Amino acid sequence: MRKIHFFVLVELILLTLAFLTMFSDDVTRGIWFLILCLLLYHYYRVDSQSNLLVVALFLFLFLAMSINPFGMAAIVFAIVYGFSAMLPYLYREHRSQSILLEMPGDKTRNTWIGDLSYFLGEGQAFEDLNLTRFSGNDIIYLDEVVLGFDSNLIIIQKAVGNTTVYIPIDVAVDLSVNTLYGDVRFFDDYYNLRNERLRIKSPNLDKANRSVKLVFTNLLGNVEVIRR
């Protein structure tokens, strides 16, 4: 059995036992728990400008599960399993590094935690980026790289951290940001995102000789796209 299947099976067993004991011990508390789950579902289905409700719901859900022995066991097991699964990848934790892309066909190990910089080598040819990280600040120097005339793509997905992209003057940008909480600077424009997605393009995108598409997804963190 694969590790992820084992983790899901154990979590389902513990959560099922938690729900059964919760309803058998106190039906009223179980009903309130279901109401909170429905409200949480409603929050994510309906666009909301305030995250106060979701924070309160998460707090109530955590308290409802933590006072139940099976719920607490599920929480502890998830934390221990997540840490043990991530431990092999944390060999460079909290270190600032510079990334130079390898030749096609070479494998590059993911760096889950730490501050990273991309395309620092002057005159380096651009290659698409598709990264998944846990936390850290990323700086992308597109003004130091030779961009192609075809579609150029950068995708970064992470939980926590800021992202800064330096763009040459003659390059158009297609930016997409999806975040739970963060601010976005797109040249001289500023946006505040609260569980929202932003899509913005340069006015001359369709006519530009060179362009780049930026796709960023995170929970907490700011995004800056700067001309220089």
Image (cartoon, rainbow, N blue to C red):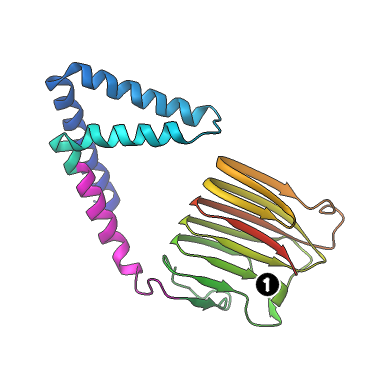
**Vertical placement of 28 versus 72: above or below?**
above
For the magenta stretch, what is the residue range? Answer: 74-95
Question: Outermost residue toward the right?
Answer: 207
Residue 102, position in %: x, y?
Answer: 55, 78
Question: Outermost residue toward the bottom?
Answer: 122
Q: Answer with the quarter of the image where residue 89 lies.
A: bottom left
Question: Residue placed at 24% from the left, 37% from the top?
Answer: 12
Q: Answer with the quarter of the image where residue 58 lies.
A: top left
Horizontally, residue 149 falls left or right of residue 29, namely right
Residue under label 1, please give it: 126
Q: Is residue 2 visible?
A: no
Question: Residue placed at 41% from the left, 66% from the top?
Answer: 113
Q: Is residue 161 visible?
A: yes
Asked whether residue 93 is drawn in magenta, I would say: yes
Amino acid type at circle 1 is: Phe
Q: Quadrant of the C terminus?
A: bottom right
Q: Secondary structure at mark 1?
A: loop
Residue 223, position in %: x, y?
Answer: 60, 56
**Which is nearer the eye, 24 or 63?**
63
Magenta stretch prevailing secondary structure: helix
